[in-house]
Image: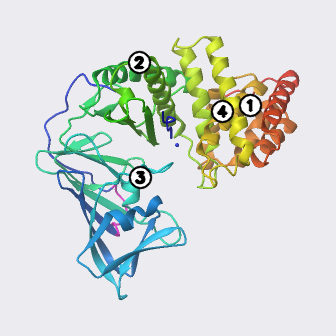
Amino acid sequence: MDRPVIRILSIGLFALAAFMVFASPLTQGDAPPDLRIDIRHSGEANLRVVYEWRRAQRRMIFQTVAEGYRKRQWTIVPDGFEIFSEGGADYIRRAGGGRFRRVEIIARPDNIRLDKEYQPLVKYGERGALLYTGHFWPMIKSGGRVNAVFDFTPAPAGQVVAFGDRAMRIENWRSPEDHPAFVYMGPLAPVETQDVMALVDPGAPQWIAEEFNTLVPRAFSALSQLFGFTPETKPNLFLSANVEGDAGRLSYAGDALPSQFQIMLRGGAWSRPNAKAREVFIHSTIHEATHLWQAAARPASDETPEWIHEGAADAITAEARVALGDWNGAAFERNAQRARSECASELETGSLNGAAARQDFRALYVCGHVIADAVALAEGARVVDFWRALIEKAERAGGYTETMVYDLIEERTGDAEFAQAVRYFADTPLAQPGEEIEKLMTAARTAAGQRRPAASL
């Protein structure tokens, strides 16, 4: 059986109003866009994407996509352009050099599931497509994204869904989060509740749709109480399911973005309700939902380790399960012990801070969970309490760093040695990971025994 894949994202009582062409005006004072990206959906999952630049360019720069996706699945029309990769980026340029203002491509979905990376484009339900704008949005040389607007046109009888917007066509669109986003184009009608706007694949088994409908309002209520706030933008949720194939396969993949997350279920084990599938679905969906709250504090750069938010999301999910009444104290402790055991195994091949480079993504979750639990023990609080304080700090600083996390650990526990022990645990290849985990927990108990009262929020 596939190990559930979890990544760093309920349902309807009434329909939305009649469609219209939706134009999102540029906010007053915005500079005119340097680029217009016109995305048209074919009715299958293929897209026609036209780039129209205000000024002629020598090349377009894109954040690279794993497995050579663009070379395999993008076709530039007409001929005369080429795609190449260099220095961790993908480029489009004229084959013979020279400037250009317009490029048109045909983009196709990929059957390869990209590990720890957003899928550029996937078939979503019957005649629908879900795209991640980040892989269609060019970069600038100095980093960051080009000043661009998007136009989205679905196939006939289709619609566009992006956050709270739903229309037959959307023009001049920018994400309300100023961040790459998921956008759906196709015939599915979203449903909106007090908590979310969601698109659920009608091919998903009925029991999954019912579980989703029941879980989301409960989980959102619990997370709002734990974090002490509700996300400013109503979240956009997507759920798709392909339950054909191996009856023993149980694969859950989730992708979270600010105010959005998607769930992709694959395998025959999802076709009928069973205890294992239900547990994976509940736990993983709460984990993805937790990222919606964590997004209030964004990493300051790509250099900020993922274990900080992924491990905390795992630990906060456990706290939410207790708050929901799903788990008692014994179940909570068993979950924590599993994280410690799995972390010890994952760190046999290298350090936690080196895990992403060696593609040991599971370490980011379970070892980040171990650190989050140790910090909570040391400060005599919950993991979510630490994150509430981190959100407050990060909002003032414009993002959080690894150093900020260690500084906050020292501030809230009053123990510089414990903060240094956490840093050592993350940085160092450990000869005996299991023993080092026990040392970290002992250091946490020592800090707890001599701490000052935890810093108030």
Kindly tell me whether residue 140 is visible in this rendering.
yes
Q: What's the magenta region?
A: 27-34
Q: Earlier in the sequence, mark 1 or mark 3?
A: 3
Mark number displayed over residue 274: 2
Front residue (pair 80, 145): 80
Residue indicated by mark 1: 375
The answer to whether mark 4 and mark 3 are in CB contact below 8 A is no
The answer to whether mark 1 and mark 3 are in CB contact below 8 A is no
Residue type at tag 1: Val
Residue type at tag 2: Asn
Separation of marks 1 and 2 at Cα, in angstroms? 35 Å
Q: Position of residue 186 (x, y in %)?
A: 20, 45
Left or right, 162 with respect to 15, comes to right
Closest to the camera, between mark 1 and mark 2, is 2
Q: Earlier in the sequence, mark 2 or mark 3?
A: 3
Label 1: how many Cα within 10 Å (few below 14, some 14–19, many 20+): many
Residue type at tag 4: His
Q: Residue at x 70, y 49 (%)?
A: 353
Residue indicated by mark 3: 180
| Quadrant in which the C terminus is drawn | top right
Q: Earlier in the sequence, mark 4 or mark 3?
A: 3
Q: Is residue 28 magenta?
A: yes
Q: Earlier in the sequence, mark 4 or mark 1?
A: 4
Label 2: how many Cα within 10 Å (few below 14, some 14–19, many 20+): few
Q: Position of residue 311 (x, y in %)?
A: 62, 36
Query: Residue farthest to the left?
Result: 156
Q: Position of residue 12 (x, y in %)?
A: 26, 25
Label 3: how many Cα within 10 Å (few below 14, some 14–19, many 20+): some
